[in-house]
Image (cartoon, helix red, strand yellow):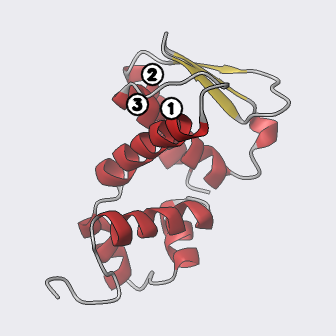
Amino acid sequence: MNATAIERAYDRLEDMGVEVMICPFSRFAALVSPDGFLGMNPLQLASGAEEHAMLLHEEGHFATGTFYQLDSPYTLRQHQENLADRYVFEKYFPPERLRAAMRAGYTEPWQLAEYFDLPQPYVEQLLDYYAEARGIDFSAPPGE
């Protein structure tokens, strides 16, 4: 686990004025409030990589102002989730950074997950975003 990546994620939230609190949620790893609060239950997170991904994702909600009520329609919730993820993907994992990791030998999703200290499904979602929304093929050299 890369503790410094997690520490930087906490620091960025603090710099945004977000107060992070430990909360004993039974169904959720984290809940955010537009008032600047992030409640999280570390017991719902299986690893440091999951904690890192959760912190990045929640930063995306605060940075983009994409909040919703838990009883909101699925389409609204999913749209807000997608906007938060897109913020994180484009800010912290731009194509150039992914290509640099791949040139360094981290070519498989599981390798990229270890390299960036993220869960593999999150990296797969990141790669899918670039392939589907931006038309980027990471299996081809840049410019093809």
**Quarter placement of the N terminus:** bottom right
- Write down the quadrant of residue 118 in the picture: bottom right
Tag 3 and tag 1, C-beta contact below 8 Å: yes
Kind of residue indicated by mark 1: Tyr
- Write down the quadrant of residue 138 in the picture: bottom left
Tag on residue 10? 1
Q: Is residue 114 above or below residue 7?
A: below
Q: Secondary structure at mark 1?
A: helix
Tag 2 and tag 1, C-beta contact below 8 Å: yes
Kind of residue indicated by mark 2: Glu
* Residue occupying the point 45% across, 31% down: 61
Question: Gap in Å between the C-alphas at discs 3 and 1?
Answer: 5 Å
* Residue occupying the point 34% across, 51% down: 92
Q: Report which residue position mark 2 lands on.
A: 14
Q: Which x, y percent locates residue 7?
A: 51, 38
Question: Gap in Å between the C-alphas at discs 2 and 1?
Answer: 6 Å
Q: Which x, y percent locates residue 38?
A: 59, 22
Q: In this rendering, would 78 be left or right of 17?
A: right
Label 3 CA crowd tier, 10 Å (few <14, some 14–19, many 20+): some
Kind of residue indicated by mark 3: Arg
Q: Report which residue position mark 3 lands on.
A: 12
Single out the residue that lies furthest toward the right. 26
Label 2 CA crowd tier, 10 Å (few <14, some 14–19, many 20+): few
